[in-house]
Amino acid sequence: MKWHQIRSYIATFALLAAVLSVRQLCAEQKPLDQAADLLSKGSIAEAVTILRQLVASDAGNADSRLLLGTALALKGNRTESIEQMAEAVRLRPQSASAHNQYGTVLSRFIEVEAARHEFEKALELDPQLSEAHVNLALMLAQASELIAAAAHLDRAIELQGDTGVAAYTHFLRAKIWAAQNQVDKAMLELQKAVQLRPEYAEAWSDLGGLRRLSLDQKGAVQALEKAVALNPDDVTAQYRLGQQYLQNGDAGKAIEHFKRADPGDVATLYNLDRALRKAGKREDAEPIERKITELRERSNRASSVALAASRLNDEGIALEKSGDIWTALTKYRAALDLDPTGFGFELNYGLALCRIGRWEDGATELREVLRLDPDNAVAAKALYIADERVARPPRPN
């Protein structure tokens, strides 16, 4: 279970929630309220202009700094965003909400330990702050501290009650139960999530997947049909529904959903082939079989190439540890030339370029890593820093 995939919750939804929080606190301050309104509409640049003016005219206004830090985070301005949030917390050290908002910004920039500290501080100041319980649970789950994460989610659920916002918390709680092989308890949490938010496509998909594992065929189909109706682009839900229809003996419907799932995935192609053959469509199945064979042969060839590339990459790591970063660069480049699909090799190459000050080249490599592996936290954090260095104006001679 990739808990770092869920960091987008903190990076987007929680930041926007922070905007609304500051807006509610500061409704009497019209320019600040105007900036919050602009942010909620996606007009980030205009909001930043107003907020910079507010901070310049009143450096001690913690609310302005909190909102400016949040706006800059939405723009991806790492250093200045963190600086504004840190100053806001310094001005308002006893505000649990401020510490929680600071934690959301740190989370966006993959400053995991610092974010965790801020969420813990927020709860120390206000144990009733449900958002901080959820945010801290995400940090703990990412660190595989599932028992502690579950405790914070349970407390958040208790505080949130039967509200729409609690649907996400139940969804997260289900993931922890599933990771602990407690399928029945996970399904109960997902049922609660979709009860509170009936349009929650991802929760419907997970509920259908778990029902399928527990052999509830009718319930699985109902949940998965709901998931794909809400989000036809969810390839996981399409694949799960195809599997269930195939298991139920309805090859025709299975074919429809396998075709909408990931076309480059061997498991999807294998099941599509089975469904086509069961439906008597042997001619349609033959090109699928050829593609499966081709993918497997390519995978076997890639395995031998990847082994040689891995050796070069390991040599580069050893050289870099010894202080010879320039020779390490050549090893990483050679590994990448041998296996261009190895995003681990590209990550090391990109990081090494950044370390020698080749920020623009490094950023290019890091973007490619994130294209191949969108959840790579190391690459994401490094790219924020690299982009800032590239954008920084040159120093005068």
Image (tube, helix red, strand yellow):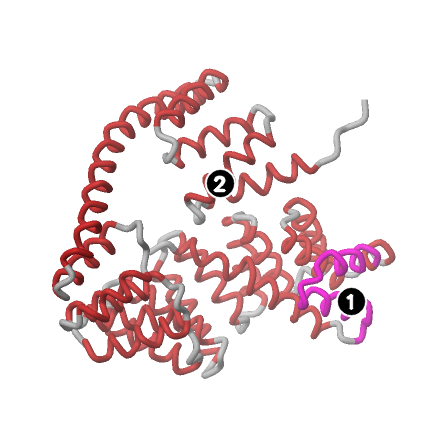
Q: Mark 1 against mark 2, which lies toward the viewer?
A: 2
Q: Quadrant of residue 191?
A: bottom left
Q: Which quadrant would the N terminus be assigned to in this image?
A: bottom left
Q: Is residue 171 above or below residue 350?
A: below
The region drawn magenta spans 28-53
In the displayed orientation, state which residue is furthest to the front. 283
Q: Residue 195's mark?
A: none
The spot of residue 386 in percent (x, y) is: 60, 36
Label 1 sits on a secondary structure element that is helix
Q: Is residue 41 magenta?
A: yes
Q: Which residue is mark 2?
A: 379
Q: CA distance from mark 1 to mark 2?
A: 34 Å
| Relative to 261, 7 lies left or right | right
Residue in front for this viewpoint, 296 or 319: 296
| Relative to 270, 390 lies left or right | right
**Which badge, 1 or 2, is on the more N-terminal residue?**
1
| Relative to 22, 50 lies left or right | right
- Identify residue type, mark 1: Leu
Residue occupying image coordinates x 63% and y 46% = 78
Q: Which quadrant would the C terminus be assigned to in this image?
A: top right
Label 2 sits on a secondary structure element that is helix
Q: Is residue 320 above or below residue 221?
A: above
Residue in front for this viewpoint, 391 or 182: 391
Residue occupying image coordinates x 39% and y 51% = 143
Residue occupying image coordinates x 55% and y 40% = 383
Residue occupying image coordinates x 28% and y 51% = 265
Q: Quadrant of residue 272?
A: bottom left
- Identify residue type, mark 2: Ala
Q: Is residue 287 magenta?
A: no
Q: Which residue is mark 1?
A: 32
